[in-house]
Image (cartoon, grey):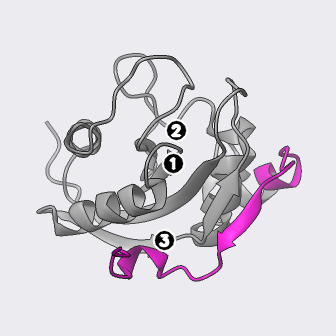
Amino acid sequence: MPSDPGPQTASLGLGGNVGDPVGSMAEALRLLDALGGCRVSAVSRLYRTPPWGKTDQDWFFNACALVETQIGPEDLLDACLSIERRMKRERIERWGPRTIDIDVLTYGDVAQHGGRLELPHPRMTERGFVLMPLADVAPAMLVDGKTVSQWLETADLTGIEVADGDAGWWRRPAATG
């Protein structure tokens, strides 16, 4: 087993369209930031995006984040899944409605296929709702031989709009009332 490689930068995709998805994503980011061995280092603007895959549902809110982490990729996945469960995420239908979704998109330069976690995320370069917010925080990140910005040039961005241009949206106190 190699020695500890030190902190790694991982990228995460977040989204949801049930209940208060923006509040859920903000809470998920705060929980990740408070996790031992993990620090949120950058968060994209907030986007409103049309449903993808299963189109007869409410629009989504999406964002991406970079985290500096000392926990391994599988443990980071487990932490994300634990946060999803804490927020009552139910996996009923593929691409269906959800309170929160947290995907590990990349983890440093790690490439792994098969198993429970594929890195980089196998469909991230096909999805404008991932590439647009990821370009906010990591435009020069290489994914499968091209930068995020290069992937974004050919992505379908139909209907994607900025919902909040302030990258600090996730740090604001939750609305009451």
Q: Position of residue 63 (x, y in %)?
A: 55, 59
> Label 3, label 2: how many angstroms apart (C-alpha)?
19 Å
Query: Which of the two labelled residues, at mark 1 and mark 3, occupies the earlier sequence position?
Result: 1
Give the residue type at disc 1.
Answer: Gly
Q: Position of residue 120 (x, y in %)?
A: 52, 38
Residue at x 69%, y 37% (from the top left corner): 51
Q: Is residue 90 left or right of residue 50?
A: left
Quadrant of the image occupied by residue 69? bottom left
Q: Judge depth for marks 1 and 2 and give the one in front.
A: 1
The residue under label 3 is 43
Residue at the image point whose x is 88% and y is 47% from the top: 154
In which quarter of the view is residue 116 placed? top left
Instruction: State whether the magenta stretch is mostly helix, strand or loop.
Output: loop
**Label ID, residue 15:** 1
| Residue ID for mark 2 | 120
**Residue 7 shows in this picture:** no
Q: Nearer the viewer, residue 176 or 28?
A: 176
Task: Look at the image and give the residue range highlighted in magenta.
Answer: 151-177
Image coordinates for residue 111, horizontal then vertical, percent: 46, 35
Give the residue type at disc 3: Val
Q: CA distance from mark 1 to mark 2?
A: 18 Å
Task: Name the secondary structure under disc 1.
Answer: strand
Mark with earlier residue (1, 2): 1
